[in-house]
Image (cartoon, grey):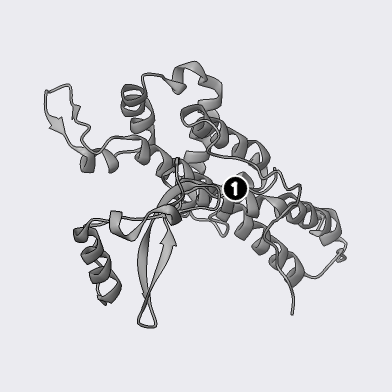
Amino acid sequence: MKHIVPKTIKIFKTSFDFKDIKEEDIPEESKEVAKDVLKSKNYDDNYDIMVQTSNNKATFGFDYLYKQEKKFIPELDPSVIYFSSAQLFSGMIYNYKKELLKNSFSLKDITKNKSNQSLDDTIKQFEIFFQFASSYVIMLSASLEAFVNKLIPIDYIYTTKEGIEKDIEWIHRQSIDFKTKKIIPNCTEKDYTIEYESKYEEILAIKNFRNDLIHLTPKNEITNTKYKDFYRKVIDFKYSEAIYSIKHYINYHEEGLIEECACGNDFYFDLIKK
């Protein structure tokens, strides 16, 4: 997968160029607000900041005080940033997995007191593979969670079986399973979990893997290797398929949000020794 085009939360086409707006056409109240925002060393989030791109599209962002000067930062869609991060981690996962399995000890070699490489090298290779794999899964899951939460209107009310009404803050605290099965179909009037049942199972596998990573606990029984089942799962997981499952879910609800760049260049995270 090529690197991902970043997207702002809101962008729309304008029929005019902001530069064509005359000073006398700007309301005095707007001028005063702009002056106050520029002079103030505090943030006033009662107002949104809108700028225009070179192709006459308007987007929003926020101010950030840097060295006593207000800077404009565009508000990016976090679901796309997280997804892009996962894509950048994905580039080297299988390379490091291949290196780990190719060079790690054979049990037969251990019995003969010989090996392909030192134990220190194998430890380092597994560490690097795990770092990339876990970061990839966490970023994919964060992308899905951020996107699902964004889809739910802030005034949406969920009514339980007991007739109790729950607001958006309660909904946001619920599991991703609950939101994708119970909330999103009502908000969008389409149900991915039914229409693409097998793909949804793949998404749940990603979610469950992420939960294992975040809430990792050792085995309770007496053993010197308390994480071996989990680590085998880390090695076996189908990383290349996972990213396409999340992309499919997101673009099903918001067409084209996850967009591969047409530049043709590949970008990915890697370790560089200096």
Hey, which quadrant is residue 117 in on the image? bottom right
Helix, strand or loop at mark 1: loop
Q: Which one is nearer the viewer's eye here, 54 or 59?
A: 54
x, y percent for residue 38: 30, 72
Q: Is residue 22 left or right of residue 129?
A: left
Is residue 220 visible in the rendered image? The answer is no
Q: Is residue 100 left or right of residue 49?
A: right
Is residue 55 visible in the rendered image? The answer is yes
Q: Which one is nearer the viewer's eye here, 254 or 21?
A: 21
Residue visible at 31% across and 28% down in the picture: 183
Residue visible at 74% across and 56% down in the picture: 96
x, y percent for residue 190: 40, 19
Residue visible at 55% across and 50% down in the picture: 6
x, y percent for residue 60: 39, 52
Residue found farthest to the bottom? 67
x, y percent for residue 267: 70, 55
From the viewer's perspective, is residue 159 above or below residue 35? above
Name the quadrant of the N terminus.
Answer: top right
From the viewer's perspective, is residue 185 above or below residue 34? above
Hey, which quadrant is residue 242 in on the image? top right
Label 1 Cα neighbours within 10 Å, binned few <14 / some 14-19 / many ≥20: some
The residue under label 1 is which amino acid type?
A: Val
Hey, which quadrant is residue 34 in on the image? bottom left
Q: Is residue 186 left or right of residue 221?
A: left
Q: Which residue is mark 1?
A: 5
Q: Is residue 269 left or right of residue 253?
A: right
